[in-house]
Image (spheres, rainbow, N blue to C red):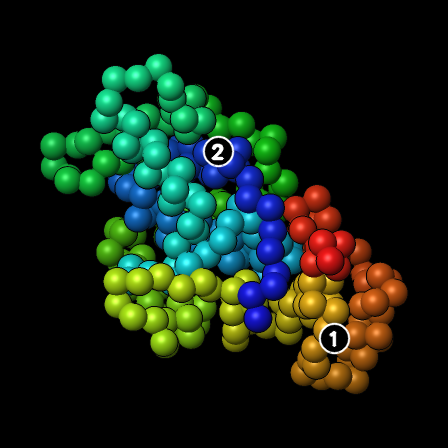
């Protein structure tokens, strides 16, 4: 477990935060952004076979966290506290604001979202997450993610105050059969492993096609966003 990896896309991170701003979410702390990104990545992974950001997820005290996105957000926040011409990429489209009513910095958009960096399915996933979770507080989202299988399973042997990886395979825990087909394809690509699926009779042809690359187009993960373990070896 843990061999499924994707390429992180910084432009998508920046424009996802701008997208949230444009949809009227005003309390975009790095904690809330991290939770919204988790739900968006999970939704798109289960429905289309790839996440949006391609980040590396870790289990921490406050739930699942996209680790590379967190590094970028921390850098943006830290650099906003000093006078410098050396801005990180996020400062080109976002600014960090410190409201007097909150001790936590918020992100605000300074430029329109560049929607061209997203596939139409990714825009739909972001819209769905805004609709379902956008009005919830960061604390509420933490509570929701603590009930999610990826965090609960990864958290079982974690020592409080530390972090541990959440393999993408855990995102599929309890997912519908349609999503399990994506997992089967990803496991075949990265691990050279054909996993058993429920309703084997229905999916036997699918399973036999994994290594011949005859999988239906609708169940082909986005090749531009996947870093194939088979090619890396």
As drawn, is 110 to the left or to the right of 13?
A: left
Q: Tell me if mark 1 has few (under 14), some (14-19) or many (20+) residues whose alpha carbon lies within 10 angstroms of its own.
A: some
Residue 39: where, in percent of width, then height?
45, 55
Q: Is residue 5 above or below residue 99?
A: below
Q: Is residue 117 above or below residue 136?
A: above
Q: Quadrant of residue 191?
A: bottom right
Q: Is residue 13 above or below residue 86?
A: below
Q: Secondary structure at mark 1?
A: loop
Q: Which residue is mark 1?
A: 194
* Residue sitting at x 65%, y 58%: 49
- Spatial CA distance of label 1 from label 2 is 36 Å
* Residue sitting at x 42%, y 59%: 58
Residue 177: where, in percent of width, then height?
64, 73
Circle nearer the N terminus (1, 2): 2
* Residue sitting at x 24%, y 56%: 139
Q: Number of numbered discs present?
A: 2
Of residues 132 and 217, the one nearer the viewer is 217
Of residues 151 and 215, the one nearer the viewer is 151
Q: Which residue is mark 2?
A: 15
Q: Quadrant of the C terminus?
A: bottom right
As drawn, is 98 to the left or to the right of 131?
A: left
Q: Tell me if mark 2 has few (under 14), some (14-19) or many (20+) residues whose alpha carbon lies within 10 angstroms of its own.
A: many
Residue 93 seen by the camera? no
Q: Which residue of the protein is positioned furthest toward the front in this rendering?
A: 233
Q: Quadrant of the N terminus?
A: bottom right
As drawn, is 183 to the left or to the right of 98?
A: right
Residue 98 seen by the camera? yes
Residue 7: where, in percent of width, then height?
60, 46
């Amino acid at each position: 477990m843990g061999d499924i990896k994707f390429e992180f896309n910084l432009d998508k991170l920046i424009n996802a935060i701008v997208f949230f701003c444009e949809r009227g979410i005003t309390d975009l702390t790095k904690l809330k952004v991290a939770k919204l990104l988790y739900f968006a990545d999970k939704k798109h992974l289960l429905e289309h076979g790839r996440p949006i950001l391609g980040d590396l997820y870790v289990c921490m005290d406050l739930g699942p966290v996209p680790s590379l996105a967190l590094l970028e957000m921390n850098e943006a926040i830290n650099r906003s506290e000093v006078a410098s011409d050396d801005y990180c990429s996020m400062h080109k489209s976002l600014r960090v604001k410190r409201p007097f009513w909150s001790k936590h910095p918020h992100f605000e958009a300074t430029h329109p979202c560049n929607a061209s960096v997203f596939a139409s399915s990714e825009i739909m996933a972001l819209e769905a997450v805004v609709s379902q979770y956008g009005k919830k507080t960061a604390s509420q989202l933490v509570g929701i993610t603590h009930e999610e299988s990826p965090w609960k399973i990864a958290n079982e042997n974690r020592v409080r105050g530390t972090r541990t990886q959440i393999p993408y395979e855990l995102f599929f825990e309890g997912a519908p059969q349609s999503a399990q087909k994506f997992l089967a394809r990803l496991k075949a690509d990265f691990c050279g492993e054909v996993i058993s699926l429920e309703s084997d009779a229905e999916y036997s042809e699918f399973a036999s096609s994994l290594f011949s690359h005859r999988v239906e187009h609708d169940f082909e993960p986005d090749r531009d966003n996947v870093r194939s373990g088979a090619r890396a070896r």
